Image (cartoon, rainbow, N blue to C red):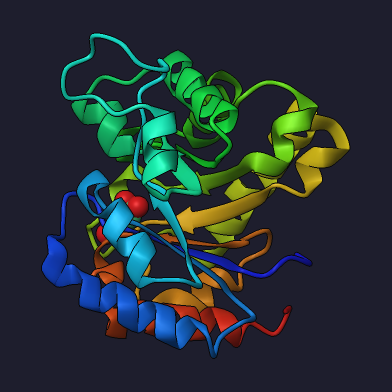
Amino acid sequence: MTTRPYIVGNWKMHGTRAMLAEARAIDRAAERLLKVEVAIAPPFTLIHATRKEATLIAIGAQDCHPADGGAHTGDISAAMVKDAGAGFTIVGHSERRANHGESNELVKRKAHAAIDAGMSVIVCVGETEAERDSGKAASVVTRQLNGSLPDGDEVADKVTVAYEPVWAIGTGRTPTPDDIADMHRHIRKVLEKAYGDAGSEVRILYGGSVKPENAAELLSADEVGGALVGGASLSAESFLGIIMAAAEDERE
Ligand code: PGA
């Protein structure tokens, strides 16, 4: 990979204004770690405040609605999160696919809405444990990518893919670096089919139980361009441990 590693913290449904101190500490430290591109996706309610606290790192949303606006009580549009200060949106996280029944088709519409609003997107894919055990991991991920990726070569530079095996999220279990490399190489092929040459530039992040202790090993796997980090992004100390491991990656 020639681009800087991209380390993204997904705060999920964690954080009130008390968490802004963590964002500030991450931002201050990121100033000294310019070899790494750092981002945080806080809950909607903190996007604006986090953007004001943190000037260097990217701030994003964890989701958006596919429509521009309308009678959708409780939903938030892409233009709204952009207006609040988000530069990117995560779409298709497995918790949204599972908890809200999000289909590939809906994830694709959300990705287009985010790009139309002027943001980039992180499209999440990943198999369940049963799918991996039955040898279907690659075919499941292919189907998710083909159904969820936004269409058109011209949008490829707005897309990052996050491979997050469902069974590795929040469990402390991870695939081996070889398994991650196999899946990332597979994802690369699907991206090149979808976007042609532009598909070789799309960053592919690994996510699922990334911690300061395993980050160096996981990030060194072939075709891993960074990490999407949940639990370990909630404190500046552990998130910075991961960012430092990325900064030391010899390929950079
Ligand atoms: P985790 O979550 O790091 O807590 O496993 C990753 C994610 O769901 O993005």
| Residue 194 appears in the figure | yes
Q: Name above or below for residue 67 compared with residue 196.
A: above
Tag count: 0
Left or right: 51 with respect to 119?
A: left
Left or right: 89 with respect to 225?
A: left
The percent position of residue 112, horizontal first and vertical second, equals: 55, 23
| Residue 126 appears in the figure | no
Left or right: 115 with respect to 191?
A: left
Q: Which residue is nearer to you in this view: 237 or 43?
A: 43
The percent position of residue 22, horizontal first and vertical second, equals: 25, 77
Quarter of the C terminus within the rendering:
bottom right
Left or right: 52 with respect to 189?
A: left
The percent position of residue 31, horizontal first and vertical second, equals: 52, 85
What residue is at 56 percent from the left and 86 percent from the top? 33
What residue is at 67 percent from the left and 21 percent from the top? 151
The percent position of residue 195, horizontal first and vertical second, equals: 78, 30
What residue is at 65 percent from the left and 52 percent from the top? 203
The image quadrant of residue 196 is top right
Q: Which residue is nearer to you in this view: 113 or 223?
A: 113
**Ligand 1 picture quarter:** bottom left
Quarter of the N terminus within the rendering:
bottom right
Q: Name above or below for residue 118 compared with residue 38.
A: above
Q: Residue furthest top?
A: 71
